[in-house]
Amino acid sequence: MIKKLIKVLFIIVIIVCIALVPIFNQGVDLYHENYSEEKLYEIINEIQSNENYVQLEDISQDYLNALIESEDESFYKHNGFDIIAIGRALINNVFSMSFQQGGSTITQQLAKNLFFTFEKTLVRKVAELFVAVDIERHLSKDEIIELYCNIVYFGNGIYGVESAANFYYDKNNKELTKLEIDALLKTLKNPNNYNPFAIEN
């Protein structure tokens, strides 16, 4: 009985792997179509020219700590992706028969924000993975999280933690309370439904 079960599982794994080959190839193509090192630095320069751009030392340490705990606990340990988180998300998605979890690191989220749409597809996830690895090769962890904090979406057309603090709480990000930080981090999960204004209403 156990041997038959192992054979069935092995066959399923083979079938899944074969099915994923074209998705992987399309993801690689999408990566090459959208990413280049030159384009990466062009986008970074454009982001840093924004008047509300804040350097890492000007971002609340409480916010940074909570962000890493919420979004990517192994941020300072991985090289762009977390294989355990990806595996966990894959298993949960299979059991729920949906694409609810992506297992994305902060670097992968940055890659998505810089180069791709927010449409949830496996092809995009593959492309995003390759871009994340390249970003980790060219930027330090501090540069990555600084950029992420400046471009992440908080609903109501607001991007970046400084703009979010100004818009929702009429203060700079270093003045945010723990409750306000928690509300903004919840916003990251679903900006249109869970931003502070939506929560209040």
Image: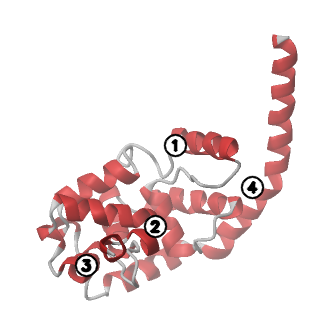
Marks 1, 2: nearer the viewer: 2
- Mark 1 belongs to which amino acid? Ala
Judge whether 159 appears above or below 176 on screen.
Answer: below
Placement of the N terminus among the 4 image quadrants: top right
In this view of the protein, which residue sits in the foreground, 7 or 130? 7
**Residue in view at x 14 percent, y 78 percent:** 171
* Classed neighbour count for the residue bearing mark 2: other residues with Cα under 10 Å, few (<14), some (14–19), many (≥20): few
**Residue in view at x 22 percent, y 76 percent:** 165
Q: Which quarter of the picture shows residue 147?
A: bottom left
Looking at the image, residue 48 sits to the left or right of residue 109; the answer is: left
Give the percent coordinates (x, y) of residue 77.
38, 43
Marks 3, 4: nearer the viewer: 3
Secondary structure of the residue carrying numbered label 4:
helix
Circle on res. 168: 3
Alpha-carbon span between mark 4 and mark 2: 28 Å
**Residue in view at x 57 percent, y 53 percent:** 102
In this view of the protein, which residue sits in the foreground, 183 or 2? 183
In this view of the protein, which residue sits in the foreground, 8 or 184? 184
| Disc 1 target residue | 85
Give the percent coordinates (x, y) of residue 154.
37, 74
Looking at the image, residue 59 sits to the left or right of residue 68; the answer is: left
